[in-house]
Image (cartoon, rainbow, N blue to C red):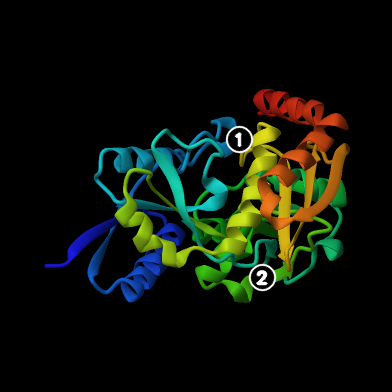
Amino acid sequence: MKREIIIGTRKSGLAMWQAEWVCSRLQELNPDYSFTIKGMKTTGDNILDVALAKIGDKGLFTKELELALERKEIDMAVHSMKDLPTKLPSGLIIGAISPREYPGDVLVSTQKITLDKLPHGARIGTSSLRRRAQLLKFRPDLEIVTVRGNINTRIRKIEEQNMHGIILAYAGVYRMGFENMIAQKIPFSICLPAVGQGAMGLEIRDSDPEIATVINKLESAEARHAISAERALMKKLEGGCQVPIGALANIEGGTLTMEAVVASLDGKESIRLNLEGPVQKAWELGDQLAQRMLDMGAGEILEKARQENDIDD
């Protein structure tokens, strides 16, 4: 009888798609095992009437899955890398990072108008402070509307809340089959993505070499290096997915090039820098870039953003 390996995931449509992709690939690569998906609800899934940034971001979409891992109720957890805090619980590791989908954001709209052509004062939906800050830097006249829920819910709210469009990650829109609603792939010059956006991470117990061997076949070394640099930057800045930090690392040959931005919530203050170096020093490069940004005042911008977010209704 084949050994059963249980894959844990959130129950949202996108999370289930990701887990099913992982399950299918692992089954192909490991025919001597059988794989089962176990869906769970996380804190972030249960609180839908409050902006994410208001309730903190320490494991909002990961904690329940990590507890199940620790209790050995599942053998691995599939996450969007952008949801994983930079500090994992003791005894857990990111065993594999999948090849990365296009990491950028997109404007989803029924009108197919690009950001620069939107009318003055256009209403744009997003729950991300990172997107809000960068959009307002590009177009200070936009009205940013907080929108939560899964992709289907957010798209439905475009008309329900009289919005001109919403901003989502390309990877999720593509995976859920809504490519036809993309009005624009937003240039990185306007909006840098969230740390780790576009890749899936497989979290496992560090004491489980058998599972580590099974999932290693899904590992993308390129995605691992790029996202390590981005996560190092976020860790140094003491940021998370609910603060206005954008970052993107790319690898060409043996060189890693990285760009990052920290911005105030109104977009009026921002620090944007880039750095390059050998890919083998990915973590150090992310750390160095963060330090340069801190030296230029990024810490003060982020602290002000946290305070404004706490008092903003």
Give left or right: position of 6 versus 63: left
Label 1 sits on a secondary structure element that is helix
Identified by mark 2, the residue type is: Ile
Residue 143 coordinates in the image, percent (x, y): 77, 46
Can see residue 199?
A: yes
Which sits in the foreground, 76 or 44? 76
Give left or right: position of 94 versus 130: left
Rate crowding at label 1 as few (under 14), some (14 to 19) or many (20 or more) other CA atoms within 10 Å: some
Q: Earlier in the sequence, mark 1 or mark 2?
A: 1
Which sits in the foreground, 116 or 78? 78
Q: Which residue is mark 1?
A: 53
Q: With respect to residue 249, does 267 lie above or below? A: above
Residue 297 coordinates in the image, percent (x, y): 85, 29
Q: Quadrant of the N terminus?
A: bottom left
Residue 264 coordinates in the image, percent (x, y): 80, 36
Which sits in the foreground, 313 or 309? 309
* Residue located at (81% from left, 54% from top): 276
Give left or right: position of 266 versus 154: right
Q: Which residue is mark 2?
A: 182
Residue 208 coordinates in the image, percent (x, y): 31, 48
Identified by mark 1, the residue type is: Ala
Rendering quarter of residue 170:
bottom right
* Residue located at (80% from left, 30% from top): 301
* Residue located at (57% from left, 49% from top): 82
Task: Find the residue positioned furthest to the left.
Answer: 1
Q: Quadrant of the C terminus?
A: top right
Q: CA distance from mark 1 to mark 2?
A: 25 Å
Label 2 sits on a secondary structure element that is strand
* Residue located at (23% from left, 67% from top): 34
- Residue 181: give its label: none
Q: With respect to residue 196, does 60 lie above or below? A: above
Which sits in the foreground, 241 or 113? 241
